[in-house]
Image (cartoon, grey):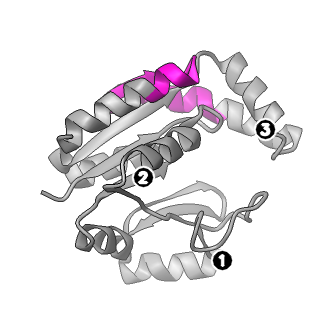
Amino acid sequence: MNKVIIFSAPSGSGKTTLVKYSLERFPELEFSISCTTRQPRGNEVDAVDYHFLTPDQFRQKIAEGAFVEYEEVYTDKYYGTLKSEVEKIWAQGKTVIFDVDVKGGISLKKYFGEKALSIFIEPPSIEELERRLITRNTDDSDTIKTRVAKAEEEMAYAGEFDKIVVNTDLDDAKKEIESLIKNFIGN
């Protein structure tokens, strides 16, 4: 059966680190590259980290029905999952792994149902989350304030996911994720 694993979390929870670990640990997983209209950060590369689109290009794909799910997270800041990306990965006989925002994760779980394992990565606290965002040094202070406020909102949705992993200690979170994935894909 074609399966998907969905990782969602407030920004700064360690989600991307845990997704990268999962991809290293399980060669049968393949990362689904999302589309976004935000600007690349740091060393991000188009078609590797994201498909970077303009807001107009993104809206055109919405009109074409090209997305499994999409969300306008902030004004003209879209994120979405292309149907073609999922189909390409399934055609390779692999399980799709998603790294998406919380609303996207909920939408994907509804769309894929029993084919999906949805995992919410929770920070140990809002204070720790803010500290991580500051030390990441990729956003200005206004952006960090916005992300922290959004994180408080997003944490209210944790119960809509199949599993919640509190990322207090990264090694413990990795072990928990590894166990969840093994059980789901049957390793």
The amino acid on which the numbered mark 3 sits, given as a three-letter code, is Arg
Circles 2 and 1, Cβ within 8 Å, touching? The answer is: no
Q: Quadrant of residue 128?
A: top right
Q: Position of residue 88 (x, y in %)?
A: 32, 75
Q: Quadrant of residue 2?
A: bottom left
Q: Residues within 10 Å of mark 2 (few under 14, many from 20)?
A: many
Circles 3 and 2, Cβ within 8 Å, touching? The answer is: no
Q: Disc 3 or 2, which lies upstream in sequence? A: 2
Q: Position of residue 140 (x, y in %)?
A: 87, 43
The region drawn magenta spans 150-174
Q: Does the magenta portion include 61?
A: no
From the viewer's side, name the closer residue of 53 and 60: 53
The kind of secondary structure the magenta stretch mainly shows is helix
Query: Cα distance, mark 3 to mark 1?
Result: 26 Å
Query: Cα distance, mark 3 to mark 2?
Result: 22 Å
The amino acid on which the numbered mark 2 sits, given as a three-letter code, is Phe
Please give the label number shown on residue 98: 2
> Up-down: is 58 above or below 25?
below
Q: Which residue is mark 1?
A: 54
Q: Residue at x 39, y 24 (%)?
A: 176
Q: Residues within 10 Å of mark 1 (few under 14, many from 20)?
A: some
Q: How many marks?
A: 3
> Up-down: is 95 above or below 120?
below
> Up-down: is 141 above or below 2?
above
